[in-house]
Structures are given as structure tokens and as C-alpha cells.
């Protein structure tokens, strides 16, 4: 089987009071707790982590063999896992990538997702030199829509019955995107 070249290397980002870096084995209990959360099970399942959290950590500590970035978000001094933001579908030919995110139930409503999505987007625009980042969420997931909006991702449209979510049903989804040429989001609104 052909081995694809690595396209992204594990790295760290500092984002204010948060640190973003690949997962480590000490995160296993928190990853498992996130995987069992009902909102994560519905909107962005961590099924493989639920089955084998150690294997999940090992895979993503290496950014899945260098194919996709997985930034876990930590409170910088206490060090507890708060959530994660992934950058996948990295396509240098078309200068684009796609983000996904989850925040642990113990860290929601504090701006973690907004801050982390902004930081990973800035990194993708700056370090990877991509020019378009997109994210997709279920229309019935207004918290995710709000994160996208606060991170400067404009709604480009609604895709009808486009994805089967954790409840087994097909849902309509919003496609959001941010370009390097778009205005930066208001820094006061995390
Ligand atoms: C969506 C999710 C990532 C948000 O994380 P978070 O760190 O709490 O997000 P933030 O604190 O940065 O912002 C949340 C915003 O959504 C709003 N919000 C939360 N629940 C809401 C709801 N039911 N309806 C409308 N807005 C809602 C908050 O008020 C806040 O907006 P504000 O700052 O204008 O008040 C988190 O809830 C989560 O992990 N959910 C399960 C997995 C998921 O949905 N992932 C995204 C898949 S695309």
C-alpha cells in the first residue's frame, strides 16, 4: 500500500490562557468522559475513543500519521483537558482545510471553543498558508453555529439532509467558511 507523505507535524499553539497541543496518555480519563457526553455523542462522536481511549491518544498524539491536526485544549496552568479542535481535509492544492471541535461538559460556556477555533484558524492561515477554512454543523446545533459566527466564519448555505449524526438521522447542515481576506473577528467576543 502506498504510504502518503506526512503533511502536518505535531505542534503546540499558545492562545491566551489556553494551550493547544496533541493529546497525551494522561488525558485518557477525560477523553473517555468527553466521549460519553450526550452532546458529543450526538453532534461529533468520539466513537473510537470510547472503544479504546489509549489507541485514540496514541493515534492523535502523532496527528494521525501526520495527516490531520488534533489540538487538545488545556487550561495553561492547571493543565486539565477542556476540549479539542481538529483540522482535517488539509488540501494544499486548493489551499483549504476543515475544522471540527468539541468542548468537555465541564468547560462549556466560557469561550473555549471560540478561542481555540480562532487560534487553529490563525495557525492554518499563518503556518500552513491555507487561504480557506470551513466548518460544518447540524442546523439544530445552535451553540456550534454561534461558535462559528464568533470565530468569523460566514454562513455560505444550508446543505439539506447531508449528514447522519449520532442519533442515526440525516440532518440539514450549515456550511461556514472564513477566508484570509475576511475581516478578523472582534477580539472582544470570545
Ligand atoms: C458546541 C460547543 C463546541 C461549544 O463550546 P463552548 O466552549 O461552550 O463554546 P463558546 O463558549 O465558545 O460559545 C458558545 C456560544 O454558544 C451559545 N450557546 C450555547 N448553547 C446554545 C443554545 N442552545 N442555543 C443558542 N446558543 C447557544 C453560548 O451562549 C455562546 O454564545 P455567546 O458567547 O454569544 O453567549 C460545545 O457545546 C460542544 O462540544 N458541543 C458538543 C459537540 C459539538 O456540538 N461540536 C461541534 C460540532 S460541529
Image (spheres, rainbow, N blue to C red):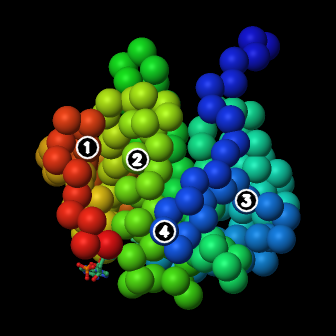
Q: Name the residue at the top extreme.
A: 2
Tell me the number on the disc at residue 121. 2
- Estimate how packed mark 3 is, as few (under 14), some (14 to 19) or many (20 or more) residues with alpha carbons within 10 Å: many
Residue projecting furthest to the bottom: 106
Residue underneath mark 4: 16
Q: Is residue 1 above or below residue 183?
A: above
The correct choice, above or below, for 167 with respect to 180 in the image is below
Q: CA distance from mark 3 to mark 4?
A: 19 Å
Q: Which sits earlier in the primary sequence, circle 1 or circle 2?
A: 2
- Residue 3 seen from this side: yes
**Quarter of the figure that contains the N terminus:** top right
Give the spatial CA distance, label 2 vs label 4. 15 Å
- Which residue is denoted by mark 3 in the rendering? 23
**Who's the residue at 27% across and 65% down the image?**
187
Looking at the image, do the residues carrying marks 2 and 4 touch, with CB atoms under 8 Å apart?
no
Residue 25 place in picture, x, y as percent: 85, 64
Q: Given this view, does label 1 or label 4 mark the residue nearer the observer? A: 4
Instruction: Determine whether the residue tagged by mark 2 lies in a helix, strand or loop.
Output: helix
Quickly name the residue at label 1: 178
Mark 1 touches mark 4? (CB < 8 Å):
no
Q: Position of residue 153 (x, y in %)?
A: 24, 51
Write down the quadrant of residue 108 in the picture: bottom left
Classify 78 as above or below 117.
below
Q: What crowding class fits label 4: few (fewer than 14 Cα within 10 Å), some (14-19), or many (20 or more)?
A: few
Judging depth in this view, the residue of 125 and 41 nearest the camera is 125
Q: Quadrant of ligand 1?
A: bottom left
Amino acid at each position: 500500500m502506498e504510504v502518503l507523505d506526512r503533511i502536518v507535524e505535531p505542534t503546540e499553539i499558545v492562545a491566551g490562557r489556553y494551550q493547544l497541543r496533541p493529546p497525551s496518555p494522561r488525558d485518557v480519563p477525560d477523553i473517555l468522559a468527553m466521549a460519553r457526553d450526550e452532546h458529543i455523542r450526538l453532534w461529533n462522536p468520539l466513537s473510537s475513543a470510547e472503544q479504546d481511549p489509549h489507541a485514540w491518544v496514541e493515534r492523535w498524539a502523532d496527528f494521525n500519521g501526520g495527516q490531520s491536526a488534533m489540538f487538545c485544549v488545556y487550561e495553561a496552568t492547571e493543565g486539565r483537558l477542556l476540549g479539542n479542535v481538529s483540522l482535517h481535509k488539509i488540501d494544499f492544492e486548493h489551499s483549504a482545510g476543515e475544522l471540527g471541535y468539541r468542548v468537555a461538559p465541564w468547560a462549556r460556556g466560557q469561550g473555549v471553543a471560540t478561542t481555540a477555533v480562532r487560534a487553529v484558524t490563525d495557525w492554518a492561515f499563518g503556518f500552513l498558508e491555507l487561504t480557506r477554512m470551513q466548518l460544518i454543523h447540524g442546523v439544530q446545533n445552535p451553540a456550534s453555529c454561534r461558535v462559528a459566527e464568533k470565530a468569523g466564519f460566514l454562513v455560505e448555505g444550508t446543505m439539506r439532509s447531508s449528514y447522519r449524526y449520532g442519533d442515526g438521522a440525516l440532518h440539514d447542515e450549515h456550511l461556514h467558511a472564513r477566508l484570509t481576506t475576511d475581516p478578523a473577528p472582534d477580539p472582544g467576543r470570545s
